[in-house]
C-alpha cells in the first residue's frame, strides 16, 4: 500500500512537471508571413491539469485518493519571421519557462487564399538546463472568409522526454487546437486545445485542456 501511494505521488509530481513544459498554445493559421515580414504575439492561457483519478484503478483498487483538477495560468510571448515567401521561423517563450524554436512551411495557398495549409516542426526545452525536451509536429489549417476573420485547426503530435532517462522514455501528446482570429492589421483571438497524454501503449491516457486569449501584431511589410 505504501509503495503504491508512493508510485501515485511520483506519477502526480512527474506529470505536473511534464505538463508544465510543452507549450500547447495555438493562435496560428495556415498562412505564412511572407519574405522579410515579422510578427509578435502574446497570449494568456489557462491549462487544466489532467484527471489523475483516471489512472487510479490502474495503480491499485485499494488506493482511493481524490486528486482535484486545477486550472493554472501562463503568459506566452512569440515572434515569427518570414525567411522566404512560404517559409517562417519562430521562437516562443512562456512563463512556464518553456522555450521553443520552430519552422513553418506553407504547402497549400498563399497569403491571400481563402484556405491555407502549412506544415511545421518545433523543438522546445524547459528551463534550458533541466534536461527536459519536447518535439512538436503540427499541421496548420485555416479558412479565411475575409481578411478580418479566420478559423483555424491545428492537429499536433508532441513527444516529451528528459535527457537523463533517454528519448525512448517519454510522454506522447496527441490532440490539437482550434480557434478564431479577427481584426485588421492587428489580430485578436480565442483558442482552445485538447491533448491526450500517454506514457506507454496500454498504460492509459490522461486529458489536458487549455483555453486562451491572444493577439498578433505584424511587423514589416505585411498588411
Image (tube, rainbow, N blue to C red):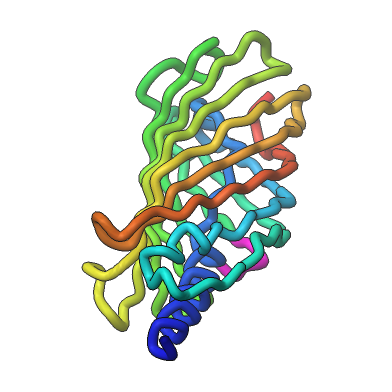
Percent position of residue 142, x then y = 53, 22
- In the rendered view, tell whether residue 23 sits above or below residue 145: below
Q: In which quarter of the image is residue 190?
A: top right
| Residue drawn at x 67%, y 10% as measured from the top left | 146
Q: Nearer the viewer, residue 67 or 196?
A: 67
Evaluate whether residue 136 shows in this view: no
- In the rendered view, tell whether residue 170 sits above or below residue 213: below
Q: Is residue 195 left or right of residue 165?
A: right
97 within the magenta span: yes
Percent position of residue 155, x then y = 43, 35
Q: Nearer the viewer, residue 29 or 21?
A: 21
| Residue drawn at x 63%, y 55% as measured from the top left | 48
Q: In this view, does 128 lie to the left or right of 160?
A: right
- In the rendered view, tell whether residue 128 sits above or below residue 89: below
Quick one: quadrant of the N terminus?
A: bottom left
Q: In which quarter of the image is residue 168?
A: bottom left
Evaluate whether residue 184 shows in this view: yes
Quick one: quadrant of the C terminus?
A: top right
Percent position of residue 117, x then y = 43, 24
102 within the magenta span: no
Q: Give the range drawn in magenta.
A: 93-98
Percent position of residue 92, x then y = 57, 56
Q: How many labels does the image show?
A: 0
Q: Nearer the viewer, residue 135 or 116?
A: 135
| Residue drawn at x 40%, y 82% as measured from the top left | 4
Amino acid at each position: 500500500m505504501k509503495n503504491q501511494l508512493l508510485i501515485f505521488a511520483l506519477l502526480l509530481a512527474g506529470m505536473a512537471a511534464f505538463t508544465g513544459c510543452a507549450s500547447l498554445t495555438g493562435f496560428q493559421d495556415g498562412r505564412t508571413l511572407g519574405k522579410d515580414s515579422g510578427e509578435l504575439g502574446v497570449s494568456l492561457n489557462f491549462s487544466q491539469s489532467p484527471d489523475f483519478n483516471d489512472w487510479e484503478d490502474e495503480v491499485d483498487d485499494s488506493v482511493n485518493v481524490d486528486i482535484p483538477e486545477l486550472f493554472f495560468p501562463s503568459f506566452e510571448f512569440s515572434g515569427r519571421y518570414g525567411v522566404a515567401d512560404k517559409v517562417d521561423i519562430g521562437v516562443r517563450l512562456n512563463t512556464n519557462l518553456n522555450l521553443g524554436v520552430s519552422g513553418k512551411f506553407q504547402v497549400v495557398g498563399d497569403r491571400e487564399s481563402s484556405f491555407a495549409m502549412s506544415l511545421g516542426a518545433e523543438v522546445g526545452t524547459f528551463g534550458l538546463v533541466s534536461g527536459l525536451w519536447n518535439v512538436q509536429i503540427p499541421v496548420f489549417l485555416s479558412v479565411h472568409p475575409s481578411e478580418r476573420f479566420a478559423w483555424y485547426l491545428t492537429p499536433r503530435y508532441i513527444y516529451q522526454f528528459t535527457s537523463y532517462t533517454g528519448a525512448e522514455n517519454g510522454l506522447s501528446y496527441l490532440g490539437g487546437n482550434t480557434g478564431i482570429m479577427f481584426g485588421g492589421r492587428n489580430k485578436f483571438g480565442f483558442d482552445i486545445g485538447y491533448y491526450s497524454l500517454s506514457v506507454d501503449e496500454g498504460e492509459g491516457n490522461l486529458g489536458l485542456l487549455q483555453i486562451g486569449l491572444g493577439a498578433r501584431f505584424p511587423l514589416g511589410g505585411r498588411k
